[in-house]
Image (tube, rainbow, N blue to C red):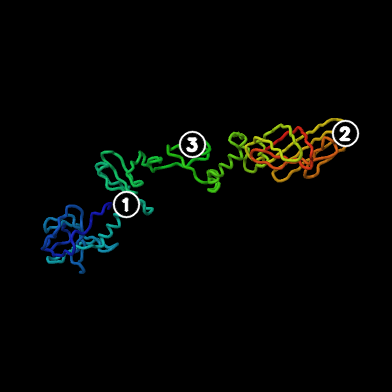
């Protein structure tokens, strides 16, 4: 059987045969009619229960006290289907026989496939006249509105129309719905909508960054540091692309360089400040200088290079004239005086985001030299 239509209709009902029956008749009359009317389906009764003449019959119709019956139902699994004679006054009991429970088993099995558990007949949505007739929604509910001709699902606390093909609506900023996982190509191209029409979603492995790294990119402090490092207009997109994993950031920093030509003047010992125009604290300062005071034997010329990285000053210089030739003094280069005999110390003292300051010491006279200041 496919549907369960055989089940008891009245509890504890027991009566007797009004007259005897042989083993072939298909109806019998009871001494008392049951209280219910059998409008559809069937039920089982047992005649002479517990006796050697016990017989299970299936009742297919009832008219007052007369029952239409199918004879000789087996009393147990694998039992014989045997009808027998019953005398008038024999007990007739309406009860749950083995046959009833076997019908339940077969009805359930007919709704499932043989592999065990998949419903053969799909579960259908509850049907209502229109959406207005739907009950209060809970997530996971489904219903069909006849007037609208559409199925709806309970999603996010609201009834959402199910699209053709049985899919949910595409997700948006205001609607909960389906999304599509982006491919690497779609991610790299900046594509927002996938082939299904749904909004694309990115999985973490595609981003290739940790939450800490993402926070560093989005944090105002670190972005400010990047602006200071690069400058708003001092780096191009092509230059930025060279800053890849494994590159030497210190070496690549040379992209931002300023050159300042100046005549360095001094009046004895003291500090002199030159604006470099870089817009940030330099990572390296170079001063190339030349001092030419004549070609006489009493005088001479001097030139040299000084480099300063914010911590250490190094440099070399050369002087020609009566006083001879001087190499660097290791840490502090020297400048020879006009007189050609005395010498003073000339070095870079400090630097900031605006200026470079150099200083003269151990030299009482005044003078001037040409110099090229390079900051990067």
Give the residue pinned by disc 2.
298
Count neighbours of disc 3 (C-alpha within 10 A) and say few if under 14, some if 14 to 19, many if 20 or more: few
Q: Are marks 2 and 3 in contact (CB under 8 Å)?
A: no
Mark 1 or 2, closer to the camera: 2
Quarter residue 97 falls in? bottom left
The dot on residue 168 is none
Residue 121 shows in this picture: no
Could you say which is closer to the camera, residue 208 or residue 287?
A: 287
Q: Position of residue 29 (x, y in %)?
A: 12, 60
Residue that sits furthest to the bottom in the current view: 51
- Left or right side of 337 for 178: left
Residue that sits furthest to the top in the current view: 295
The residue at the point 19 percent across, 58 percent down is 9
Q: Is residue 334 above or below residue 113?
A: above
Q: Are marks 1 and 3 in contact (CB under 8 Å)?
A: no
Could you say which is closer to the camera, residue 245 or residue 132?
A: 245
The residue at the point 62 percent across, 43 percent down is 245
CA gap, disc 2 and disc 3? 78 Å
CA gap, disc 1 and disc 3? 46 Å
Could you say which is closer to the camera, residue 319 or residue 48?
A: 319
Give the residue pinned by disc 1.
111
Mark 2 or 3, closer to the camera: 2
Quarter residue 324 falls in? top right
Give the residue pinned by disc 3.
191
> Where, quadrant-wise, is the C terminus in this rendering?
top right
């Amino acid at each position: 059987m496919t549907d369960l239509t055989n089940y008891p209709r009245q509890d504890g009902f027991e009566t007797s045969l009004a007259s005897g029956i042989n083993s072939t008749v298909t109806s019998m009359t009871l001494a008392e009619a049951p209280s219910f009317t059998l409008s559809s389906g069937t039920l089982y009764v047992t005649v002479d229960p517990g006796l050697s003449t016990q017989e299970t019959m299936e009742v297919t119709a009832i008219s007052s006290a007369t029952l239409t019956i199918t004879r000789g139902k087996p009393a147990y699994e694998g039992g014989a289907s045997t009808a027998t004679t019953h005398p008038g006054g024999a007990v007739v009991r309406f009860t749950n026989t083995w046959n009833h429970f076997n019908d339940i088993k077969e009805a359930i099995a007919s709704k499932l496939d043989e592999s065990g558990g998949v419903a053969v007949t799909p579960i259908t949505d509850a049907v209502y006249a229109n959406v207005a007739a739907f009950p209060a929604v809970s997530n996971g509910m489904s219903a069909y509105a006849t007037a609208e001709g559409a199925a709806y699902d309970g999603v996010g606390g609201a009834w959402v129309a199910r699209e053709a093909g049985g899919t949910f609506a595409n997700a948006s900023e205001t609607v909960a719905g389906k999304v599509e996982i982006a491919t690497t190509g779609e991610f790299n191209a900046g594509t927002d909508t996938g082939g299904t029409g749904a909004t694309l979603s990115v999985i973490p492995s595609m981003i290739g960054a940790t939450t800490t790294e993402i926070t560093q990119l989005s944090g105002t402090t670190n972005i400010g540091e990047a602006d200071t490092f690069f400058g708003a207009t001092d780096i191009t997109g092509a230059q930025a692309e060279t800053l890849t994993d494994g590159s030497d950031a210190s070496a690549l920093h040379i992209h931002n360089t300023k050159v300042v030509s100046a005549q360095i003047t001094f009046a004895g010992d003291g500090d002199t400040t030159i604006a470099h125009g870089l817009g940030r604290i330099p990572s390296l300062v170079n001063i190339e200088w030349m001092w030419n005071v004549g070609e006489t034997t009493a005088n001479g010329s001097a030139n040299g290079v000084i480099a300063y990285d914010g911590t250490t000053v190094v440099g070399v210089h050369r002087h020609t004239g009566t006083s001879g030739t001087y190499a660097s003094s290791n840490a502090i280069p020297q400048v020879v005086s006009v007189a050609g005999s005395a010498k003073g110390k000339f070095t870079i003292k400090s630097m900031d985001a605006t200026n470079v300051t150099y200083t003269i010491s151990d030299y009482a006279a005044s003078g001037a030299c040409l110099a090229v200041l390079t900051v990067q």
